[in-house]
Image (tube, rainbow, N blue to C red):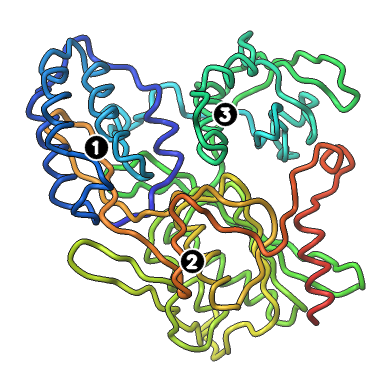
Amino acid sequence: MRILLLGAALVAAASSAAPMQASRPVETFDRAWSIIRDTHFDPSMNGVDWNAVRAELRPKAEAARSDAELRAVVRDMLGRLGQSHFALIPATLDAPGGGGDLTARPRFDLRPAGDDLLVTRVEEDGAAFRAGVRAGWILTSIAGSSTKALLASLPADLPRRLYLVEAWRQLETRLRGPDASQIELGFLDGASRPVSLAVGRERERGEAIKVGNLPVVFVRVESEARRTPSGGTAGLIRFNAWMPAVDRPFQEAIDRFRAADGIVIDLRGNPGGLAAMLMGISGHFLTERVPLGTMKTRENELRFPANPRLVSAAGEPVAPYAGPVAILVDALTGSASECFAGGMQSLGRARVFGQTSMGQALPAMFDRMPNGDVLIHAYGDFVTADGTRLEGRGVVPDEEVPLSRADLLAGRDAALERALQWIDRTR
């Protein structure tokens, strides 16, 4: 199945328990190595001597005493390519109820900012908000472990973009646990005073979606009307993953805002999803079948044209929305979200606000391994309509808006405010 990989899958994969004895280690290693050799979009394997990698690591796979050791070897192999969308998901995560103790988390969002971990959003109907957690607070410890020590354990030579993504993955893994359980968290509050709180974990909200061999993803779409500084109206739409379940509520939101002065699409923290969704969502804003970008594989090229949406959710004839479109991105905007934002930007159909995105934009497939694990592997590259390659670069905003603790503590969403100001200027 073709997919632009979801970051949630990588978070879950990082901390699954393993059997005491490795299952079919050599067969599994060989299968993973062969699939990548045969499907990687670059015949030169990104400059890596793939045969030498096999010669070095195959004996280690053969000697693996547990599935955990085998996975470490396979992940070492995948890491040699230095590219996104190569991952291994343990078989236990694909079973009914898979994911073990990773089924729930506190309902607030985190972002690395400098040396701090900022709470950027707290869901007001969640246990974290009731416990007193607020946007702008700094997370200092998780279950007694210092977050600064955790961040210090990351490789010192990681590029800043990869550092931000890896820090987020590590934190997400540690925050997760059984539904209705509590976790002790340390913060610096708005006055920089230490605060320790027992915060409840809650299951993800949204529609549970199972795609192929990936862990369950909980998909949700939110929309609301916002006022611009000059008194205009803008529609704000946010969703957390590119899945078919997004299509209907997104279309309904577009119908609601057809008369608005502008539309803002919030893709901050959205790690990606199914590549085919790009064509339908972009069709709400484009009247021609112009491609957002091109996927280049070893054998051919596949364009992603907009599919103009000419019928409303109620079945009535409509024209695609013609007003100004703003897109919000940040360091945890990835994959399909990057392809959409970068594609719309390259066509001049949207203006992008926020921080540079992940730069992890390779399309990927997944295959079942002999030991039951699932290998996710990139099979293509993606360039936008104007030829921009997003892998390793990310989507660079038209208007860079740094993440600011002072803004968060004041209840301000600076990126959204800049987008609303631009809508005023445009209209």
In this picture, residue 11 sits left or right of residue 122: left
Front residue (pair 289, 294): 294
In this picture, residue 7 sits left or right of residue 149: left
Residue 123, quarter of the rendered image: top right
Q: Position of residue 91 (x, y in %)?
A: 25, 30
Residue 152, quarter of the rendered image: top right
Q: Position of residue 241 (x, y in %)?
A: 49, 52
Closer to the camera: disc 3 or disc 1? 1
Question: Which element type, helix, strand or loop, lies under badge 1?
Answer: strand
**Nearer-N-terminus badge (3/2):** 3
Disc 1 from disc 2: Cα separation: 27 Å
Question: Which element type, helix, strand or loop, lies under badge 3?
Answer: strand
Q: Which residue is mark 1?
A: 374
Tell me the amino acid under the disc marked 3: Arg
Closer to the camera: disc 1 or disc 2? 1
Residue at image x 54%, y 73%? 346
Disc 3 from disc 1: Cα separation: 24 Å
Q: Which residue is mark 2?
A: 247
Residue at image x 15%, y 20%? 61
Report the label total: 3
Classify 10 Å Cα crowding around label 2: few (below 14), some (14-19), many (20 and above): some
Tell me the amino acid under the disc marked 2: Asp
In the rendered view of the protein, which quadrant contains the N terminus? Answer: bottom left
In the rendered view of the protein, which quadrant contains the C terminus? Answer: bottom right
Q: Is residue 351 above or below residue 43?
A: below
Classify 10 Å Cα crowding around label 1: few (below 14), some (14-19), many (20 and above): many
Q: Which residue is mark 3?
A: 105
In this picture, residue 181 sits left or right of residue 87: right
**Nearer-N-terminus badge (3/1):** 3
Q: Residue 49: which disc?
A: none
Residue 369, quarter of the rendered image: top left
